[in-house]
Image (spheres, grey):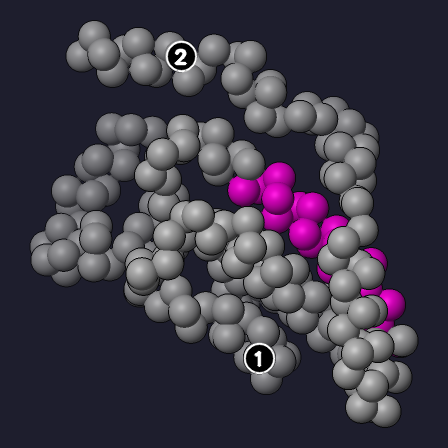
Amino acid sequence: MAVQVLWDLPNGKADVPAVMKCAVENGVRIGAINPNVYRETYCYVCRRHHLSGDGPRAASISTTAATPMTTSLWAAWIPTRCFASSHEIFDITWETGQAPDIAYMVDQSHNLKNKIEETIQTSNNAQVLFAKAALVDRERLAACQKKGEILDAEETLREAFFADVRPRPREWRRSKGLPEDPIATFCESGVCHERQKRERNA
């Protein structure tokens, strides 16, 4: 799991032992340690000179932000940005013939939803949006951009964004022997119910 510097390590290095102890006790491993740069993340991912450089880059998918924005903006705000980030990754691959080395990360804050269910839902949504970005007609888009045909270029992206690709991830999961509906499978497992029961009895 990722931790936030200002939230999880307010005292800097002095908080590291306690955070590591907490992680071990709860059976999780600390991954990325993030600065609070939510608004800059999207720009960082989408600027091609960052993606085309040497070494790994970070692609972050956020469901909320430490700004006045709220979770109610999820449906209108995040899908388009996640799609745009995925599109840039495919685009630089198409242009250079080589996929950039990117470390993907899910960065989210759970306020109302169950944490595990929401994380699974986010993963599902990210797969769908990534699949949408793969459908962009890049040759057509490049031609429109070269001619300055803004409307046609936008429509090229919109066609991919509004395509219903939901069966594709389900087919991929089935081919790998994975549950087609991860959220339903998790709910049916009873793990969440058992955990809540243990926490109430603690």
Q: Quadrant of residue 14?
A: bottom left
User: Residue at the location (21% across, 8% down)?
Assistant: 201
Is 56 left or right of 48, judged from the image as shown? left
Q: Which residues are magenta?
A: 122-139
Residue ID for mark 1: 47
What residue type is disc 1 on?
Arg
Q: Is residue 130 above or below residue 110?
A: below
Camera-side residue: 200 or 29?
200
Query: Circle 2 — which element?
Result: helix
Residue holding disc 2: 193
Q: Is residue 53 visible?
A: no
Give the Cα distance between marks 2 and 1. 43 Å
Residue 68 visible here: yes
Measuring 48% from the left and 37% from the top, which residue is drawn there? 119
Residue 136 magenta: yes
Determine if the magenta segment contains residue 184: no
Please determine whether, in this image, residue 109 is positioned above or below residue 155: above
If the image is split into quadrants, where does the C terminus sit? Answer: top left
Tag 2: amino acid: His
Residue 155 lies, in percent from the top left, at: 81, 69
